[in-house]
Amino acid sequence: MNMIANVLVTTKAGMLDRAVEDISKISEARIIKRLLGRYDVIAVVDAEDIERLGEIVLEINRSPAVLSTDTLISFKFWGELGRDFAAVILIRLTEPEEGEKTAEDILKLEGVKAVALVFGSADAIAFISDSDTRAITRLAKQVHSIRGVFRTETLVVF
């Protein structure tokens, strides 16, 4: 069974394009997007197992353009994730054991394309389809107001 992971990448100053170029050479990097926010890139990786995922993350970190990575391993997924998402919302939950209910409530919001429960520095990640900044702001506020959500961080694709 394959493992899906969201690798959040911080690049060295002025090296964003080089990092994207290097990551795009990894065949398991299915989606690569530039971000505005604390992280510069998100790479959605589809690895055959945990060992291969580790190799991929090490390969990303070996790029001279990469400063650091934060890997969020998906263990449950709702919705359809394509290449056309406009933002991601990293979510910390007040009650991680209620994550499935919270994820289902988030997915009901208009403009949310997919939600994944993850292991890592966040408990969940929501993929937003609407590219209008007002809509992204509205969705971020709606996600934050859902019962069980403690904190959110929105990263906009550009």
Image (tube, rainbow, N blue to C red):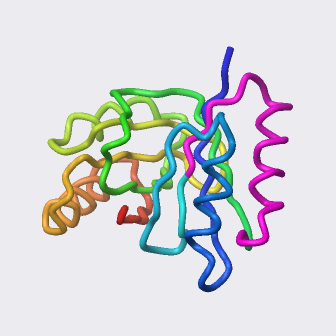
Image location (x, y in percent) of residue 43: 57, 49
Image location (x, y in percent) of residue 75: 59, 29
Q: Residue at x 36, y 46 (%)?
A: 127
Q: Is residue 109 left or right of residue 46?
A: left
Seen in the picture, residue 55 relative to 145 is either above or below; the reply is: above
Q: Residue at x 44, y 63 (%)?
A: 151
Seen in the picture, residue 13 relative to 138 is either above or below; the reply is: below
Q: Quadrant of the N terminus?
A: top right
Question: From this viewpoint, which residue is outermost toward the bottom?
Answer: 13
Magenta stretch holds residue 23: no
Q: Quadrant of the C terminus?
A: bottom left
Residue 3, image quadrant: top right
Q: Is residue 6 left or right of residue 69?
A: left
Seen in the picture, residue 3 relative to 132 is either above or below; the reply is: above
Point out the stretch of residues depicted in magenta. Answer: 43-66
Residue 22, image quadrant: bottom right
Nearest the viewer among 114 and 64 is: 64
Image location (x, y in percent) of residue 54: 82, 41
Q: Is residue 119 left or right of residue 128?
A: right
Q: Residue at x 22, y 61 (%)?
A: 136
Magenta stretch holds residue 46: yes
Question: From this viewpoint, which residue is outermost toward the top?
Answer: 1
Image location (x, y in percent) of residue 28: 65, 34
